[in-house]
Image (cartoon, rainbow, N blue to C red):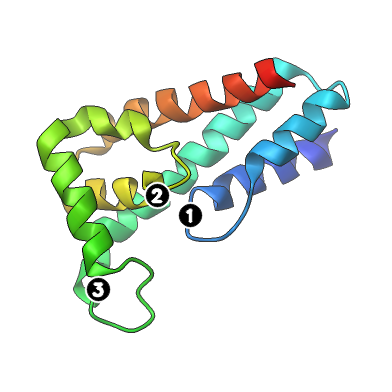
Amino acid sequence: MVTSTLFLFGSAFFAATILPFYSEVVLFALLRQGGDPVLLLVVATIGNTLGSVVNWWLGLSLLRFQNRRWFYFSPAQIARAQYWFQHYGYWTLLLAWLPIGGDPLTLVAGIMKVRLAVFLPLVAIGKGLRYVAVFYIS
């Protein structure tokens, strides 16, 4: 069980970054195998939220590299996320769980220098609710 829980944490963490991981599939499988739902939901939420913190930190520190070829997000993606963030404010971080736009949103939060104390609870709530939905689907 420890190995599968660590795998869930890792997949949730990397799913929140630019790497292609699908933590919902791992969570679904572990729930179907009879894993402790509370433990699995907490582990997935923490892992995914911490992965988003990586994006936030990258936004704070790596924006100076945005014109480099290897930079993951295009200027158009950043501009679109900044528009959403400026238009709807901090509450948009509740949507960081979205498969399209969620990761850039957490990057933009770093670019916009959102305090970590504001960032963490909003992102964790949104991501946690997504995993709760996976629980009810399983």
Q: Earlier in the sequence, mark 1 or mark 3?
A: 1
| Within-10-Å neighbours for mark 2: few <14, some 14–19, many 20+ | many
Could you tell me if the residues under marks 1 and 2 are in contact, i.e. CB atoms within 8 Å?
yes
> Quick one: SS at disc 3?
loop
Q: Earlier in the sequence, mark 2 or mark 3?
A: 3
Residue 57 lies left or right of residue 40; in this view the side is left
Label 1 vs label 2: CA separation? 7 Å
In this view, the residue farthest toward the right is 33
Q: Quadrant of the C terminus?
A: top right
Q: Amino acid at mark 1?
A: Thr
* Residue 60 percent coordinates (x, y): 23, 57
Q: Residue at the spot x=48%, y=30% of the render?
A: 127
Name the residue beneath numbered marker 3.
66
* Residue 123 percent coordinates (x, y): 38, 32
| Within-10-Å neighbours for mark 3: few <14, some 14–19, many 20+ | some
Nearest-to-viewer mark from 1 and 2: 2
> Quick one: SS at disc 1?
loop
Name the residue beneath numbered marker 2.
103
Q: Residue at the spot x=64%, y=42% of the render?
A: 23
Q: Amino acid at mark 2?
A: Asp
